[in-house]
Image: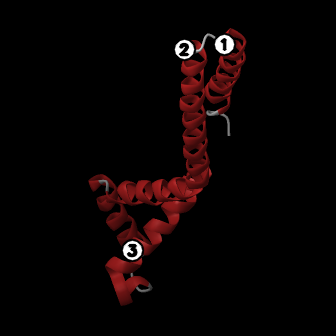
């Protein structure tokens, strides 16, 4: 991400100088521009702006993945609750084959949730 950070840094520095100097941007010497940038860097204003831009970019990129993960968690939780209820009913009526089958299915669903939920 170093290259992206450098590109964003150059852009932020250029835009900041244009905002600060306004019409005088073209007439200002490079030494004066560097002095202003050094002062802004020492106060951390440039770095804060860069971080906010990069964080906004990362949030936009990660949004579909988080939405999918949230939907999968909802489905896994719902299936887990449903199967747990059926297992409880099967134990109550002493249908051990049904308990075993539902337990295996519940174990498979939980295994998929644990191992697949973090993969993207």
State yes or no: discs 3 and 1 in contact (Cβ < 8 Å). Answer: no
Is residue 87 among the parts visible in the rendering? yes
Q: Classify residue 31 as left or right of residue 11.
A: left
| The C terminus lies in quadrant | top right
Determine the secondary structure under disc 1: loop
Residue at the extreme front = 93
- Can you tell which quarter of the image residue 32 is in? bottom left
Q: Residue furthest left?
A: 43
Question: For this view, does 116 lie left or right of residue 9?
Answer: right
Give the camera-side residue of 22 and 29: 22
Where is residue 15 shown, x and y percent of the image?
A: 44, 74
Q: How many marks?
A: 3
Of the image marks 3 and 2, the number of the one nearer the N terminus: 3
Front tag of 3 and 1: 1
Category of crowding for the residue at label 1, using alpha-carbon neighbours closer than 10 angstroms: few (below 14), some (14–19), many (at least 20): few
The residue where tag 2 is placed is 92
| Mark-to-mark CA distance, 3 and 2 | 75 Å
The residue positioned 45% from the left and 66% from the top of the image is: 12
- Which residue is drawn at the image coordinates 56% and 24% (left, top)? 84
Residue 100 x %, y % = 69, 12
Secondary structure at numbered mark 3: helix
Q: Position of residue 5 (x, y in %)?
A: 54, 54
Is 34 placed above or below 51 here?
below
Question: Which residue is under mark 3?
Answer: 17
Residue annotated with mark 1: 95
Residue 80 lies, with reference to residue 30, above or below; the image says above
């Amino acid at each position: 991400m170093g290259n992206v950070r450098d590109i964003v840094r150059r852009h932020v520095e250029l835009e900041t100088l244009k905002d600060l100097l306004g019409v005088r941007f073209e007439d200002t010497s490079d030494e004066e521009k560097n002095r202003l940038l050094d002062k802004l860097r020492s106060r951390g204003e440039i770095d804060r702006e860069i971080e906010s831009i990069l964080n906004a970019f990362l949030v936009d990129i990660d949004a579909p993945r988080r939405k999918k993960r949230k939907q999968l968690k909802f489905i896994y939780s719902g299936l887990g609750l449903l199967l747990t209820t059926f297992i409880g009913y099967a134990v109550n009526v002493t249908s051990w084959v049904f308990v075993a089958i539902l337990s295996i299915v519940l174990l498979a669903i939980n295994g998929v949730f644990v191992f697949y939920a973090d993969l993207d």
